[in-house]
Image (cartoon, rainbow, N blue to C red):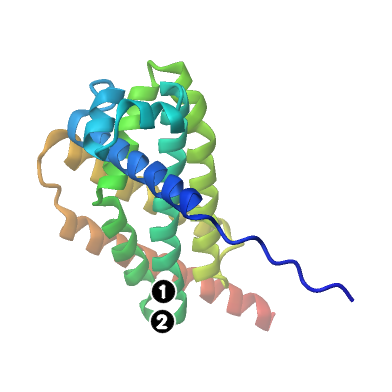
């Protein structure tokens, strides 16, 4: 039997190149946050990353390639944060999952990553190229959100009530976070989060009661 295939170890130059590329992408996200998408130039990003113009062009010959890679990099960072939080919730007690899920997602929405995504979504309205890049990323994130939610509440996932409340939760929390970022005004988060938790507990309790009744019939 042939020995298992082992990928070749990366050379120092390959590792250095990957680190430089990641540094540039992280700098792009920082510039989008601090300056705004339309105000950010490749020169701004190069300066923030501490690399030369030549190094920028080596990794990203065009601005379009840089923007596409930055959007995908940002998407991956959001997914990693989201997945880590959801895995922790799944390992916890079932009776606290509503509260923990809402608190976890609210934390994720109050990050630079979400703020930059909101910036890009607004900018995409008048930038067709950005819209083309952003659309599949947003769709992929929504699919990941739906999948993780159904795993956390596996006994409810196929019910219409769960689907309805899952959408309500996502849009309410994202709307609250976006409103706070855009207006700069503090949203009444405790009141709204407490209400949302109460409504979800009540709704899910009703669904479970209906299912128990159906099994007894």
User: Up-down: is 132 above or below 145?
Assistant: above
Indicate whether 150 appears above or below 127: below
The residue nearer to you, when weighing 157 against 101, is: 101
Kind of element beneath mark 1: helix
Q: Name the residue rendered at 39%, 52% in the picture.
A: 78
Q: In this view, does 1 lie to the left or right of 42?
A: right
Q: Which residue is drawn at 41% across and 74% down?
A: 89
Mark 2 neighbour class, 10 Å CA radius: few under 14, some 14 to 19, many 20 or more: few
Q: Position of residue 13 (x, y in %)?
A: 47, 49
Q: Residue 21 has which mark?
A: none
Q: Which of 94 and 135 is in front in this view?
A: 135
Image quadrant occupied by the N terminus: bottom right
Tell me the quarter of the picture where residue 124 sits: top left
- At which x and y percent is residue 87? 46, 71
The answer to whether residue 159 is left or right of residue 120 is right
Give the percent coordinates (x, y) of residue 197.
31, 65
Residue drawn at x 11%, y 38% is 184
Q: Name the residue under label 2.
A: 92
Total tally of numbered discs in the picture: 2
175 and 201: which is toward the camera? 175
Answer few, some or many: residues within 10 Å of disc 1's Cα (few below 14, many 20 plus, some between 14 and 19).
Answer: some
> Which residue matches tag 1?
89
Q: Is 159 placed above or below 186 here? A: below
Tell me what residue is drawn at x 42 percent, y 37 percent: 71
Asked which secondary structure carries label 2, the reply is loop
Q: Can residue 175 be seen in this view?
A: no
- Alpha carbon separation for disc pair 1 and 2: 5 Å
Residue, far left: 185
Residue 118's image quarter? top left
The spot of residue 30 in percent (x, y) is 25, 40
The quadrant where residue 5 appears: bottom right
Disc 1, disc 2: CB below 8 Å? Answer: yes
């Amino acid at each position: 039997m042939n020995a298992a295939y082992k990928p070749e170890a990366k050379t120092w130059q390959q590792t250095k190149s990957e680190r430089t590329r990641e540094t540039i992408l992280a700098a792009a996200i920082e510039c989008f946050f601090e300056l705004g998408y339309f105000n950010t130039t490749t020169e701004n990003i190069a300066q923030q990353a501490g690399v030369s113009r030549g190094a920028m062009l080596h990794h990203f010959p065009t601005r379009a390639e840089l923007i596409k890679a930055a959007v995908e990099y940002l998407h991956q960072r959001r997914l990693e944060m989201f997945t880590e939080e959801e895995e922790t919730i799944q390992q916890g007690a079932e009776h606290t999952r509503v509260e923990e899920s809402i608190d976890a997602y609210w934390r994720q929405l109050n990050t630079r990553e979400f703020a930059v995504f909101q910036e890009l979504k607004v900018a995409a309205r008048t930038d067709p190229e950005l819209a083309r890049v952003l659309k599949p990323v947003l769709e992929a994130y929504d699919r990941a959100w739906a999948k993780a939610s159904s795993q956390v509440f596996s006994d409810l996932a196929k019910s219409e009530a769960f689907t309805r409340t899952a959408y309500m939760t996502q849009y309410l929390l994202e709307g609250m976070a976006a409103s706070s970022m855009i207006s700069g005004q503090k949203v009444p988060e405790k009141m709204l989060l407490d209400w949302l938790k109460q409504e979800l507990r009540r709704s899910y309790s009703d669904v479970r009661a209906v299912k128990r009744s159906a099994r007894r019939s």
